[in-house]
Image (tube, grey):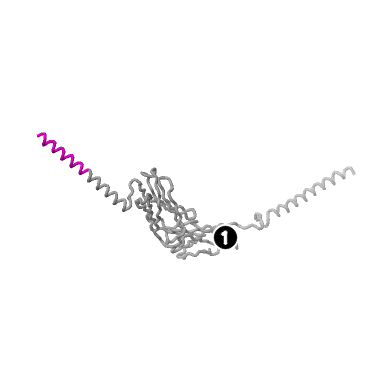
């Protein structure tokens, strides 16, 4: 009996080793998958993106712009563009489509591009802004009437007027600022801002300027006039007549005094002779 126990223990250990190896082999086959391919997680799909560029575009009223819609989907369906603007030409390439948008007149338009890939649809958005920088900003020479200066600023050929802010400045100080959001027209327009200003003694010899500014959804557009110095102001017509009369009277007095001086000097010279 003593010799049988070690022999049976030896056979039992061999069987255990062979069985464990078979189990590990079966587990390895389950992990490796069929035909040796790596495991694929269930419930996942390859992500894809859609871009519409440029994301923001600014054009003059009536102008056109190209937008490019692209994605990384290997087999996308035909992209779809959603916009109220009029479409022109279309160009295509691997993974992209370009669209031409014509006669842009609305000050702000959103354009969306939709791409479907393996049943999933994603979109990208661009915003197109139509605007016209002022052709000119002109500040007339201020006119003094009844102790107040009339400041008149002209902003020409500008769009959209409803997003325009006109500001009058004396040096770095704001005299007056006005938003023109009451204007709702969709055409180029000329705008004139008139403001009566009571200037103080410290305001003389200071430059006065007119500024036009747009804020179009973060797009800031600025234009300004040439400065006008208060010391070179043009007075009202009544003030001009009064000033001319005063100057004429002063000149007459000076001529009379000069003539009397010359006559007196000539008389003195003749007496001494």
Whether residue 76 is situated above or below residue 197 in the rendered picture: below
Residue reaching furthest to the left: 273
- The quadrant in which the N terminus is found is top right
Q: Which residue is drawn at 44% across and 55% down?
A: 164
Relative image position of residue 35 (x, y in whole percent): 66, 57
Relative image position of residue 142 (x, y in whole percent): 35, 51
Of residues 182 and 13, the one nearer the viewer is 182
Residue reaching furthest to the right: 1
Q: Is the magenta stretch mostly helix, strand or loop?
A: helix
Q: Residue at x 68, y 54 (%)?
A: 32
Of residues 188 and 18, the one nearer the viewer is 188
58 left or right of 28 in image: left
Relative image position of residue 209 (x, y in whole percent): 39, 49
Residue reaching furthest to the top: 272
- Residue 9 forms part of the magenta stretch: no
Relative image position of residue 115 (x, y in whole percent): 55, 62
40 left or right of 16 in image: left
Q: Could one spot residue 9 in this view of the protein?
A: yes
Q: Residue at x 49, y 58 (%)?
A: 127
Q: Could one spot residue 100 in this view of the protein?
A: no
Q: Give the range drawn in magenta.
A: 254-273
- The quadrant in which the C terminus is found is top left
Of residues 26 and 181, the one nearer the viewer is 181
Of residues 33 and 255, the one nearer the viewer is 255
- Residue 255 forms part of the magenta stretch: yes
Give the number of callouts. 1
**Disc 1 marks which residue?**
122
Mark 1, other Cα within 10 Å: few <14 / some 14–19 / many ≥20? some
């Amino acid at each position: 009996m003593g010799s049988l126990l070690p022999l049976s223990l030896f056979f039992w250990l061999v069987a255990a080793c062979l069985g464990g190896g078979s189990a590990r082999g079966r587990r390895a086959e389950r992990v490796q998958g069929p035909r040796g391919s790596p495991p694929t997680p269930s419930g996942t799909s390859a992500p894809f993106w859609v871009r519409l560029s440029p994301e923001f575009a600014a054009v003059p009223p009536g102008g056109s712009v190209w937008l490019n819609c692209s994605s990384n989907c290997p087999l996308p369906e035909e992209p779809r563009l959603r916009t109220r603007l009029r479409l022109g030409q279309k160009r295509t390439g691997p993974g992209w489509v370009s669209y031409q948008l014509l006669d842009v007149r609305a000050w702000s338009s959103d354009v969306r591009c939709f791409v479907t890939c393996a049943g999933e649809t994603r979109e990208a958005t661009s915003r197109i802004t139509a605007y016209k920088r002022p052709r000119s900003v002109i500040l007339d020479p201020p006119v003094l009437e009844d102790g107040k200066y009339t400041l008149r600023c002209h902003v020409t050929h500008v769009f959209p007027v409803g997003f325009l802010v006109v500001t009058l400045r004396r040096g770095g100080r704001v005299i007056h600022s006005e938003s023109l959001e009451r204007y709702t027209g969709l055409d180029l327009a000329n705008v004139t801002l008139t403001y009566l200003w009571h200037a103080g003694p410290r305001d003389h010899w200071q430059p006065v300027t007119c500024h036009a500014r747009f804020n179009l959804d973060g797009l800031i557009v600025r234009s300004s006039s040439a400065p006008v110095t208060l010391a070179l102001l043009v007075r009202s017509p009544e003030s001009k007549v009064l000033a001319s009369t005063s100057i004429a009277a002063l000149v007459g007095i000076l001529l009379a005094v000069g003539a009397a001086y010359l006559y007196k000097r000539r008389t003195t010279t003749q007496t001494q002779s």
